[in-house]
Image (tube, rainbow, N blue to C red):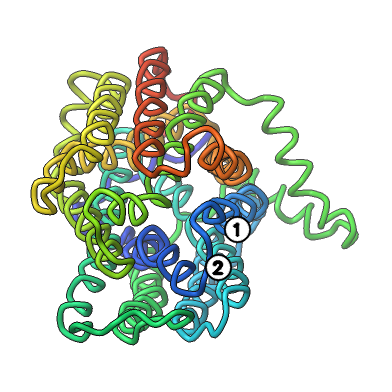
Amino acid sequence: MKLTKPSLSFWQILNMNVGFLGIQYSFGLQQTAINPIFLYLGAPEDMLPILNIAGPVTGLIIQPIIGAMSDKTWSPRWGRRKPYFLIGALMGSLCLFAFPHSPVLWFAVGLLWILDVGNNMAMEPYRAFVGDKLPEKQLSLGYQMQSLFVGAGILLANGSIVLFQYLFGGESVEEAGTIPQWLYYSFFIGAFLSLTTILWSVIKTPEIPPSDEELDEINKIKKLPFSKRILKPFMEIVEAIKEMPKFMWKIGAVYLFQWYALFIYWQFTTPLFKKTLDFTTSEAASQAAKMSLTYNTVTMIVALMLVPLTLKFGGKKIYAISLIGTAAALFSIPYISDPNLVLVPMIFFGIGWAAMMGIPYTMVSKIVPQERRGVYMGILNMMIVIPMFIQTLTFGPIYKYLLGDNAINAMLFAGVFFGIAALLAFRLNETKSVNVD
């Protein structure tokens, strides 16, 4: 019999999610600054998808393994999820500091691999951490609070890019093979936030000790031979997939189209503005940062507003409608020639991003067993990175041979995929929790 989880105050829930700020700042730099750096260092546009393969590959491998390991971890001093936060944050911090110093393309690509390992180590247990701490009635608030920090982190990252280019970019001419100095500062801030925000949450939020049954299972695993302990997380993942609720398979179908489309958007926003607004790479990167700045501001504003809406109308409806709005935003962007007006569709994108970053996690957390929450959150994140992996392998040729090397067509392609994701989201049937909180 599980103990009843106490309700937490608004500020306790906020404190436990502060670490997400640093993780998402790093993610914001990956969305907006990494691909321009690849372009600065000489990467051709049709190579951008494959150069971003680090994200899906590391997510596919790291997140479920870390989830399974954290389920079976307990230290009276360090806790269950916190050790993974700290190691991941330290790796991410070091990589962010080094990234703008990349002398050549292959060095930057290698750093992206290490950065993604660190971010995945920190992010996946964080999703389970919220489910561990909160009773079911507060799960929506907990995950939408994470959504708020998603918006805040990416907002700060992209705001810093716009600010530093304005302050230090000047009228400097782009130099082939060189990363502009003004871009360095955003990465240095990220290196600082990655570690300090995680430390804040670690210090402020104690973890709930495992039940006697869970502790017995953890101690049994500690007594296994080293080779069997290494294999245990993989066995946990396989077993969890075999017993996975049908609802998660349906979420996987939505994610296939949703995340394929998102990766296209992040990769091809800069090339799009070079074409539609006749911008240089720096100008296009700055415009892309303004887009991200706008939609993440909206995400911050609406994230907690979605809590009462999902309670009243159900997560499925709010989620699906938000995806329709996101599709509409992508359909309109290529046909707006004013750099200021092109920010307007980002209102709908921001609402969609707030829903994507909170609602699915709330729905899944309610239906998975407590003792497997980490591994199932890892599997849910596998459903994010598999579409990204497919996109990195397939979209380069699609872009070059089917879409005519045209970033406008790429954005419209992404809009169609968001529309399909919305239709599939309407098929989700929300299930009551099997947990006893």
Numbered marks: total? 2
Helix, strand, or loop for circle 2? helix
Mark number displayed over residue 54: 1
Please give the name of the residue rendered at 59% of the width and 69% of the height, measured from the top-left corner: 109
Whichever of labels 1 and 2 marks the residue nearer the N terminus, that label is 1
Q: Position of residue 226 (x, y in %)?
A: 87, 62
- Position of residue 226 in the picture relative to residue 383 (left or right): right
- Position of residue 392 in the picture relative to residue 243 (left or right): left
Helix, strand, or loop for circle 1? helix
- Position of residue 135 in the picture relative to residue 70 (left or right): left
Please give the name of the residue rendered at 62% of the width and 73% of the height, measured from the top-left corner: 106
> Residues under labels 1 and 2: Cα distance?
7 Å
Amino acid type shown at disc 2: Leu
In front: 259, or 289? 289
Mark number displayed over residue 186: none
Amino acid type shown at disc 1: Ala
In front: 294, or 51? 51
Residue tagged 2: 112
Q: Quadrant of residue 314?
A: top left
On the question of residue 70 being in view, the answer is no
In this rendering, the answer to whether 324 lies above or below 145 is above
Please give the name of the residue rendered at 49% of the width and 68% of the height, measured from the top-left corner: 38
Q: Position of residue 128 (x, y in %)?
A: 48, 48
- Position of residue 243 in the picture relative to residue 307 (left or right): right
The answer to whether the residue labelled 1 contacts the one labelled 2, judged by CB atoms less than 8 Å apart, is yes
